[in-house]
Amino acid sequence: MYNKLLWTVFCTLAKRYIKALQIPTDKSLSLFQPFIIRKTMNYWEGKKIRLRGIEPEDYEHFYQWNLETETARNLAWLWFPTSRESQRAWAAAESLKKGINDEYFFVIETLSGEFVGSIHSNTVSRIDGSFRYGIGIVERARGQGFAKEAIRLFLGYYFNDLRYH
């Protein structure tokens, strides 16, 4: 409890100091970069990507993604093939969820609207202030910094706004 309070005070003072010096947030100390409030019009948008909710029409992206069996083999397990209809139903059901218990599924897309992956929270515990997250980037979009930026936006929201630690 004491460490959390100390860290909160430290971050608050650091933010005030940076603001008082009028240092643009994109040039501030990298240690605080994920946690400083950005000066953009869309909270969910970075320099390369934006996070958005899943839409029923996204099912085809996930269906094609599930065909990348080599990616699946590097994860926890290789899943059974799915049908387009099951992916359609899953995407439609996911699109109706409203972030219950702070669990939410985001689509990662480029600023031009190209699907590049997803990030989601799971195993959320408000009592402990902890959560897990999963992220996946389609093979053609890897190595371009999309995951890094998505994680910064995602963790910035969970640490700053939802007060997880």
Image (spheres, rainbow, N blue to C red):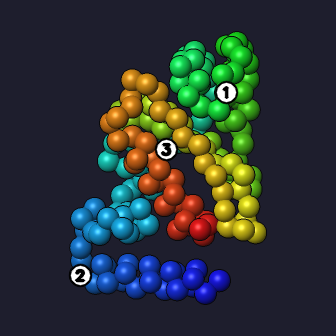
Q: CA distance from mark 3 to mark 2?
A: 30 Å
Residue at image location 72% in from the left, 52% down from the top: 123
Q: Quadrant of residue 61?
A: top right
The amino acid type of the residue labelled 1 equals Trp
> Within 10 angstroms of label 1, few (less than 14), some, or many (20 or more) residues?
few
The amino acid type of the residue labelled 2 equals Leu
Q: Which residue is the site of mark 2?
A: 21
Numbered badge on residue 51? 3
Classify mark 2: helix, strand or loop: loop
> Mark 3 or 2 closer to N-term?
2
The C terminus lies in which quarter of the figure? Answer: bottom right
> Mark 1 or 3 closer to N-term?
3
Q: Are marks 1 and 2 in contact (CB under 8 Å)?
A: no
Measuring from the top left, give residue 37's x and y in whole percent: 41, 67
> Within 10 angstroms of label 2, few (less than 14), some, or many (20 or more) residues?
few
Measuring from the top left, give residue 31's x and y in whole percent: 36, 68
Classify mark 1: helix, strand or loop: loop
Q: Which residue is the site of mark 1?
A: 77
